[in-house]
Image (cartoon, rainbow, N blue to C red):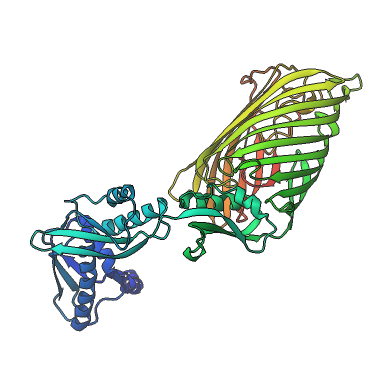
Amino acid sequence: MLASVAISLLAPAAALAAEPKAVIQGELDKALKAEIQRAIGVVKTHPESRVDARRRAREASAAAIAVLRSEGYYDYQVEPDVGEGDHPDAVVRVTLGPRSMLAPARIVWDGAAPDAATIAVAEKALNLKPGAPGRAADVVAAEGRVAAMLRDRGYADASVRPRRVVVDHQSHTLQPTFSFAAGGLVHLDGVKVVGKTRTRPGWVGGLAGWKQGDVYSPAKVGQLERRLRDSGVFNSVTVALAPPDENVAGLRPVVASLGDRPPHTIELGGGYSTSEGAGIDAKWSTYNLLGRADTLTLAGRLAQIQQKLDAELDLPDFGRPDQIFKVGGDLFADDTKAYNDDGLGVRANLERHYTRTTFIALGAAIDAVNTREKTAINPNGVAVGENLNLVIFSTLAGFALDRSNDPLNPTRGWRVSAEADPTYVTGERTLPYLKLQGQASGYLPLDADANTVLAGRLKLGSIVGGSIPDVPADRRFFAGGGGSVRGFGYQKVGPQLADGTPLGGASLFESSLEVRRHITGPWGVVGFIDAGSVGPTFTPDFHQVDVGAGVGVRYNLGFAPLRFDIATPVTRRKGDPWAEFYISIGQSF
């Protein structure tokens, strides 16, 4: 009884199972037979009659012939047939015959030929070796290579004419003859700006990677489009060579069609952790105010440990293409367990970009700060310290090298960054020192679809020439918290006073290892281990390393994941909580 039920349940499934449209017979190598079978396809029903089977065999034969010819078999025999019975299989019998090999290819020019050097490069670009199999795909690819080469060498109007392919069934050869109309060599004029935009045409022209009269280069035209897109102030950017009828005195302009994005945007964000509390961020951006793809950003942060107002003006392609000048200032106040401070500062940075996230940077800043440090415990058990008014001058030199596949949710690749900050402190304390820090992270997919990713991070820091407690507290290294060593409170990794007040240090070590797993739809999970230490000397301390571990949930918002983590301190000390919670946007690194 059970067997009969199983058979009846399986019967409909068997009827719907896909089967080859026809059976291929003949002496064929495995790869060619599989290619023919893919071209023939599958069906969900068996032939209803011999007539239906014969129709399928004819259709399958046509598909098989197309594959054979594309692979250079022109002396084939393909016979459609049917099997035995009232409901037979469709059958295709294939006899390959000799394969046609390539004879020397030829190029003919429709109209004026290009210069001799270009003709020689065209012959080389064909890359069709006599005696090689006469595959159709190789012939078509050769034609495409020559057409692309002509445009790369300045023949912007080059076009492909119908090619002629002769198959000799006696010698079993295939000889292609390609035909091209090269047109004339195009020389470039300046940039013509069109569209609804506030951008100054003169500034756009300054981004062009060519001089008036230079030979047309599609790479340089594409480079101009990339530079305009990277500015981030346009909704649409199209850059193309003007049509031939706009040729003036032998020169063709390049047309940049620009559509500005809305002049203002507002962004809101927030986060929460049990150690740092809640925080909200707001940002108001104004675009293209000066007509040179500039961005003016006013930002504010209101959090339990920090309050800040900031203004920054970014000028892309400053002085030269792919170079950004940033100038800004801020008012700030920090209320942390290690120190309290408030003040104001101004800064200027110059970044030389190679990609949007790979660059080198130079900068300088001046900050006027009132800082209240906590360096000792008084007889009443209260942390006390100095109240200092300082002026801090600092410079910056750094780089970031990004070879990952996504800035906010990477699944493969790696990143390296480093920064050196020579600093001079004056006012109620005088001290010069050099602050160094660097970080590397890597992302390794463990399957083809990157559903499981192994991610790692290492960060090191050192303050050279300044000791603790001479270095102002707000310039020291601290560790612990959501972006550092999870499982520990904010600033809670490293030396502390008797009441648990963090002291900070002159050196830093942090590392993280995560396994990120996509579950379904936008959901994913993470398991992680973080480790870190803060030391009193400039050499990173690996003897007293704090370790935290935990798990997290990720919800992909489309542009970045929403992150919820819970972690516990593995090397828990007295007074440390058993668990810490973190909510933020973007991966932890």
Is residue 499 visible in the rendered image? The answer is: yes
Q: Is residue 42 above or below residue 459?
A: below
Q: Residue furthest right?
A: 380
Q: Residue furthest left?
A: 170
Q: Position of residue 115 (x, y in %)?
A: 33, 51
The C terminus, quarter of image: top right
Tell me: 521 left or right of 424. Answer: left
Question: Viewer-proximal residue, 473 or 495?
Answer: 473
Residue 542 quadrant: top right
Q: Is residue 127 above or below residue 159?
A: above
- Residue at the image point whose x is 71% and y is 60% from the top: 262
Q: Is residue 508 above or below residue 192?
A: above
The N terminus, quarter of image: bottom left
- Residue at the image point whose x is 59% and y is 37% from the top: 359
- Residue at the image point whose x is 69% and y is 24% from the top: 435
Q: Is residue 381 above or below residue 452?
A: above
Q: Position of residue 297 (x, y in %)?
A: 75, 48
